[in-house]
């Protein structure tokens, strides 16, 4: 069994980007600039955005954080996005989800210039992903593909189960894994809330990507010997022994599943850091695309 | 076993559209207008485009057919598309594929105004399909969904195998069947050229959509008792007993598989006519969207 060390691979990718940015600076060229918009004060969202801004600083990207009140109107948010679209210095725009209930995620995502949509959520970017001409692949699935690539995991012809069909993780993951690419070429079964006989599917899969958000539900008896396990779940579970009062748990019963697996991501330190690395790569690519 | 009669359902849909068009005419309103572009003289393409133009005539849609030489340049084709985009009377545009090798399918598809892309091939329409906010669903998968809907086939929680991952059929089909919709909510396994143990997958599936284009490869021993069989394959096979010198064969060994199935599409007369009905529905919707 080998740990898929997202922390390490993410670090490697960010170090590479740091060198690339240093070269841009040396040549007096434009450096990548990510703008993050955060509406309201959701604790998890604060943490995620802070981690993205911190990654920009580490690499040497410019970043702008736009904070808006929980009660801000949709039209105000759309106006902010329009300004960022027009701002020639901004290469990538991300609006941290979820948004307050009175704002339409869909309209907001549609408002972002697709060429700056480093989260890869705009329909045109999702469509290009399906068609095999991707511009920006959304960060979590992209990060997982980078992780599989880094560890040279053989995926061609393998059976993969993707658990969860969200637009942000499961759905694009199933598309990427089944595409005629490397990594890729898996025979993918996409599972969701209506799926029956889940165990039958997971226990015949060579690769499992779980994005259900149900702490430790994937048990050892649901997993084939030698499977590759990618755990996207991250749930706060009450834990009195921790100072924070909670522990972060993945979808996988790690202690029992790890010994059966060939490769496995830990939580935390697996998929999470890869997500940020992927976002940074997208931001760099957005700048490159526009400014050569 | 029941035949899924695409001819009949297509007729029903077209009759409904005919009534709707008659109402538009009676009210002095704009009637839907489909423009089809055919480059070169590919025999199958000629047949398909002719069938689409004929369907327009039956329903009462206006249609325009633009024929271009096999040797026409990409820029000339793009100019024709631009004119059709600008033409306020044209509601739907389809460019029959495949195009000659010197023309990029991708650039041509990108040139079509997404609001007139009744084939549903433009990335923005593919993206919306994935995100569950579809405008135009490409004709073959859309036709299959209409067929399942017409026969009220229970798909929720069922296991489905989609054979073939093309952008036109297999990939969108897998997305539609696994979406949280009715029909839909299947647990879908997408199979392709790299898939091993195909029989294992098909024989545990409640629904099989085959779009491989390999005549009669799906045999009775690959199919579960009571499965729903959708045959998208259509291949010309030499047949001296026919005046044309060939017979049309689906992917399914119909004679042997039909008795085991609960529902099955014949070839011809199954998916083919539904494809045209779906295109007509898209064209009507395109007109409605613009002209109320």
Image (spheres, coloured by chain):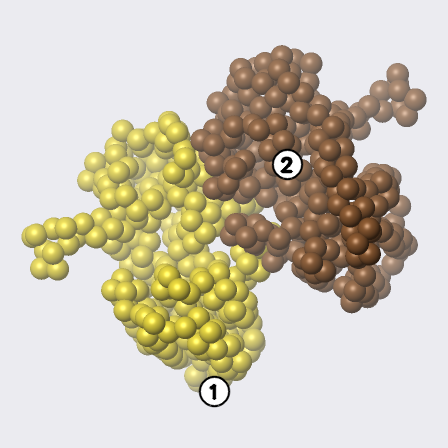
Chain colours: A yellow, B brown
Residue at the location (32% across, 74% down)? A69
Among all residues in the image, which is located at the extreme left?
Answer: A241
Residue at the location (50% across, 40% down)? B181
Whether residue A175 is visible to the viewer of this picture, yes or no, is: yes
Residue at label 2?
B146
Between A279 and B169, the one lying in front of the other is B169
Q: Which mark is residue A150?
A: none
Q: Quadrant of the N terminus of chain A?
A: top left
Between B200 and B116, the one lying in front of the other is B116
Name the chain under label 2: B
Among all residues in the image, which is located at the extreme right?
Answer: B243
Residue at the location (86% across, 53% down)? B64
Percent of width and height locating residue B169: 64, 40
Q: Quadrant of the C terminus of chain A?
A: bottom right
Residue at label 1?
A28
Residue at the location (64% across, 36% down)? B146
């Amino acid at each position: 069994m080998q740990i898929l060390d997202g922390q390490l691979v993410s670090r490697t990718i960010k170090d590479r980007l740091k060198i690339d940015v240093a070269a841009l600076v040396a040549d007096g060229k434009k450096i990548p600039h990510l703008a993050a918009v955060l509406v309201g004060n959701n604790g998890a969202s604060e943490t995620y955005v802070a981690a993205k801004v911190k990654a920009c600083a580490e690499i040497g990207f410019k970043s702008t954080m736009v904070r808006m009140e929980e009660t801000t109107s949709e039209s105000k948010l759309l106006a902010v996005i329009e300004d960022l679209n027009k701002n020639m210095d901004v290469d990538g725009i991300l609006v941290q989800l979820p948004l307050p209930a009175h704002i339409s995620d869909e309209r907001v995502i549609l408002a972002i210039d697709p060429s700056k949509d480093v989260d890869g959520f705009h329909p045109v970017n999702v469509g290009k992903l399906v068609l095999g001409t991707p511009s920006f692949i959304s960060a979590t699935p992209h990060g997982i593909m980078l992780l599989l690539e880094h560890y040279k995991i053989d995926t061609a012809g393998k059976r993969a189960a993707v658990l969860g069909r969200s637009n942000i993780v499961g759905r694009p993951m199933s598309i990427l894994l089944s595409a005629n690419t490397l990594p890729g070429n898996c025979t993918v079964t996409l599972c969701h809330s209506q799926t029956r006989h889940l165990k039958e599917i997971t226990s015949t899969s060579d690769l499992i990507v779980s994005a259900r958000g149900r702490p430790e539900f994937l048990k050892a008896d649901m997993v084939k010997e030698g499977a590759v396990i990618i755990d996207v779940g991250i749930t706060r579970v009450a834990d009195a022994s921790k100072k924070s009062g909670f522990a972060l748990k993945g979808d996988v019963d790690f202690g029992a599943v790890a010994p059966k697996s060939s490769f496995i991501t830990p939580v935390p330190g697996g998929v999470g850091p890869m997500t940020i690395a992927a976002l940074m790569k997208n931001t760099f690519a957005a700048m490159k695309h526009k400014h050569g």
